Image: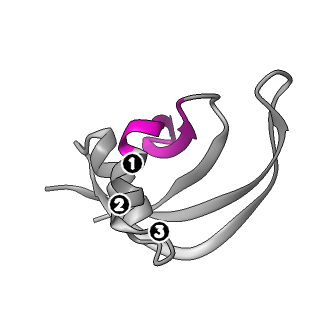
Amino acid sequence: MTLYTHEILTYDVWGNETDGWEVNDVFRTGLRVAIPVDASDSDVIRAAYGSLEFVSDAEVEEMLNTVEVDPICQHGTPSLYLRAKENERPLIELRPLSVG
């Protein structure tokens, strides 16, 4: 199974649902997750939020219904952008580091 190692990046987001969202700043967390190439959105959400110690298992399960994954492929390796389904607010990014 091919895995991509991603770093979790968090955002400082400005804006609102009406006027749109703007990522004001991006913060590197230093946290890494390995995600299979064929991972489902649920797998990606569980891997990303499950690795954050301040997010409970119940919150992760709730996010399966409220978060969507938008893969953007540049240079052959996808960055995974997670955003709120309700208003498309950017939440976090999984930036690829390596393939293993």
Rendering coords of residue 90 (x, y %): 65, 42
Q: Residues within 10 Å of mark 3 (few under 14, many from 20)?
A: few
Label 1 near label 3: C-beta < 8 Å?
no
The extreme top residue here reads 18
Residue 63 horizontal/vertical position (percent): 42, 47
From this viewpoint, is residue 5 visible? no
Residue at image x 26%, y 47%?
Answer: 37
The residue labelled by disc 3 is 55
Secondary structure under badge 3? Answer: loop
The reply to whether the magenta stretch includes residue 78 is yes
Q: Main secondary structure of the magenta part?
A: strand
The disc labelled 1 sits on which kind of residue?
A: Glu
Q: Is the residue 85 above or below the residue 98 in the image? A: above
Q: Residue furthest left?
A: 1
Residue at horizontal 57 percent and vertical 52 percent from the top? 93
Label 1, secondary structure: give it: helix
> Could you say which disc has been placed on residue 62 in the image?
1
Q: Are marks 2 and 1 in contact (CB under 8 Å)?
A: yes
Question: Could you say which is closer to the camera, residue 15 or residue 80?
Answer: 15
Disc 3 versus disc 2: nearer the observer: 2
Q: Quadrant of the C terminus?
A: bottom left
Cα gap from disc 3 to disc 2, whole angstroms: 8 Å
Q: Give, as a three-letter code, the residue at label 3.
A: Val
Q: Position of residue 54 (x, y in %)?
A: 51, 75
Q: Which residues are magenta?
A: 64-85
The one nearer the camera, 53 or 2, is 53
Q: Earlier in the sequence, mark 3 or mark 1?
A: 3
Question: Alpha-carbon neighbours of circle 1 within 10 Å: few (<14), some, or many (≥20)?
Answer: few
